[in-house]
Image (tube, rainbow, N blue to C red):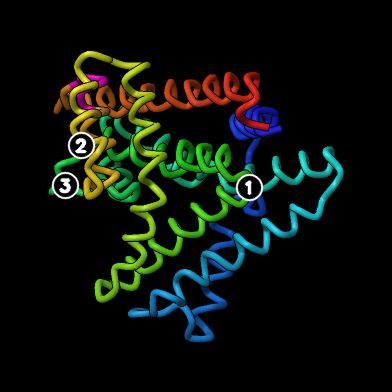
Amino acid sequence: MTLISLIVVLLAERVANQSKYWQANFYTSHLFAFLQRRDIVKPGMQSATFIAVIGLPTVFLLILLGQIDSSIVRLVLDTAILMVCIGCPALRETYKNYLQAANRGDFQASSMYADQLGHDVDSPATFGQMLVWLNYQHYAAVIIWFALLGPAGSVLYVLTRALHETTLEQHDDSHPISEKVLHILDWIPVRVTALGFLLVGHFSKALPIWLSHFGNLHTPAKTLLCDVARAAEEVEPDETDCTEEPCTLVRLAKRNVMFLVVAISILSLSGWLR
């Protein structure tokens, strides 16, 4: 059922316009706004509070889905939850606007759209590598956690990512619990995703980078992914063409998503995944 849900969601996500009710941000923003009004989600919140906010909905969903005996109902629910968790139409639309602005030579507008996507000109990561990171957070990591723990895994990752972003918006640097939890949740998925880059990109050039980071427990997930992506798809930013580098790396990320689908297909056929 994992494979069926994944294929249906990826096809639907590409061909259909998602309303706000099919986007994770709609639910996480309402949930965190509710908790902020009750002074639960706030700057400097305790670690136990953070764990409860992301853990209780996940445990509730696990229990709820465990009570369902019908395979058809379970398939529908799994697919619907994954559809909500995966992707981000707002980011995809912003990226399209960036390309349109760049193609018509409006570099001021394209720079504005790049800022909206979270690119920092002072960051060591290029704009294309930032897009690879966003693709990982909204596609690859969600898919891998869905394969590992089902819908509850995807919900756990999405809640943690969204709550981490909320703490950043609050300029909360006093308690890095969100960063620690997200680092733990990213440890396996980012290495699997980077492994995919090896197989769909320049294997010999990227393998040493992947191996050097693999056993390091403290390497930030974003650093690992960007370093491997840089080696797997070598392309230099061009001041005269600001679309070549991001488009090339986005294609790499898309090929990697297909690699994940193929890998899950093999694991499903061999009985490792249900």
Q: Quadrant of residue 173?
A: bottom left
Q: Nearer the viewer, mark 3 or mark 1?
A: 1
Q: Secondary structure at mark 3?
A: loop
- Circle 2: is it few (<14), some (14-19), or many (20+) Cα within 10 Å? some
* Percent of width and height locating residue 96: 42, 34
Magenta range: 230-235
* Percent of width and height locating residue 168: 32, 66
Write the residue at 41% across / 51% down.
185
- Residue assigned mark 2: 126
- Residue assigned mark 3: 123
Marks 3/2: CA–CA distance = 7 Å
- Residue assigned mark 1: 151
State yes or no: discs 3 and 1 in contact (Cβ < 8 Å).
no
Q: How many numbered marks appear?
A: 3
Nearest the camera: 4 or 59? 59
Write the residue at 52% across / 70% down.
53
Three-letter code, disc 1: Pro
Q: Nearer the viewer, mark 2 or mark 1?
A: 1
- Circle 3: is it few (<14), some (14-19), or many (20+) Cα within 10 Å? few
Q: Is residue 15 visible in this depiction of the protein?
A: no
* Percent of width and height locating residue 257: 47, 27
